[in-house]
Amino acid sequence: GENVEQHPSTLSVQEGDSAVIKCTYSDSASNYFPWYKQELGKGPQLIIDIRSNVGEKKDQRIAVTLNKTAKHFSLHITETQPEDSAVYFCAATGMEYGNKLVFGAGTILRVKS
Amino acid sequence: GAVVSQHPSWVICKSGTSVKIECRSLDFQATTMFWYRQFPKQSLMLMATSNEGSKATYEQGVEKDKFLINHASLTLSTLTVTSAHPEDSSFYICSSYRTSGYTDTQYFGPGTRLTVL
């Protein structure tokens, strides 16, 4: 089955700097890769996603890149702000998994002001 | 994004009692909903897939008689933790699966914190 590895487990950046979180997946048949932001005591919030027919997607300060050959995808946050501090989860899925998401272990992002 | 609600947001109960958690998809119909469990500082663990009008599909190791799931309508799924014990204390999160052609996506509820005394 699918396995998703996420790095780093914790990331501290200075406000205004960029943050990059990387995930690798094992099943080349996976074709959908969402990223979720989870604040303390809340449910995960979808922040951006990408499908396998696209190499990059951007939404304001957030971007995701996908390398299908290497089977990895990354979340890029530019001009970080204190409110970006949260836990970020990547996930992967495909039709053969019944669209069930396989999550990475999560990254704690701390933005220092 | 889409709105998914959960009720209650937190619940404290005595050991041996049953607790029902509701998950509602407020702005779209969902034939499929998912139930997750999350322990502190850990990732989400899928418990079961809830299908409207049919039996839920449970992940390996999840007791279906302990975690009863009912997907009675296209906007409501319920999870009942039966005969709860302290080890069932956790953060329970549901998600609704939105199918919209190319943009199939899961949207999560705010979670329910269960504490069993």
Image: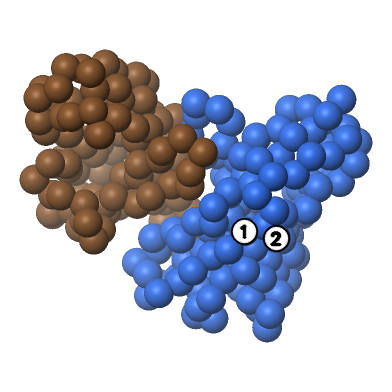
Residue lying at the far right of the rendered structure? A16
Q: Quadrant of residue B27?
A: top left
Circle 2: element type: strand
First reached walking from the N terminus: tag 1 or tag 2 = 1
What is the chain identity of the residue bearing mark 1? Answer: A
Q: Which mark is residue A6?
A: 1
In which quadrant of the rendered image does the C terminus of chain B lie? top left
Image-based side of A2 in relation to A13, left or right: left
Circle 1: element type: strand
Letter of the chain in blue: A
Palette colour of chain B: brown
Q: Residue at x 84, y 39 (%)?
A: A13
On the image, the x and y values in percent for residue B55 come to 12, 54
Can see residue B27?
Answer: no
- Residue on which the image places disc 2: A22
Query: In the picture shown, does residue A5 fall above or below A60?
Result: below
Total marks in image: 2
On the image, the x and y values in percent for residue A46 come to 57, 44
Q: Residue at x 23, y 61 (%)?
A: B60
In which quadrant of the rendered image does the N terminus of chain B lie? top right
Query: In the picture shown, does residue B28 fall above or below A103?
Result: above
On the image, the x and y values in percent for residue A81 come to 82, 31
Disc 2 marks which amino acid? Lys
What is the chain identity of the residue bearing mark 2? Answer: A
Image-based side of A16 in relation to A31, left or right: right
Q: Residue at x 58, y 63 (%)?
A: A5
On the image, the x and y values in percent for residue A18 come to 86, 46
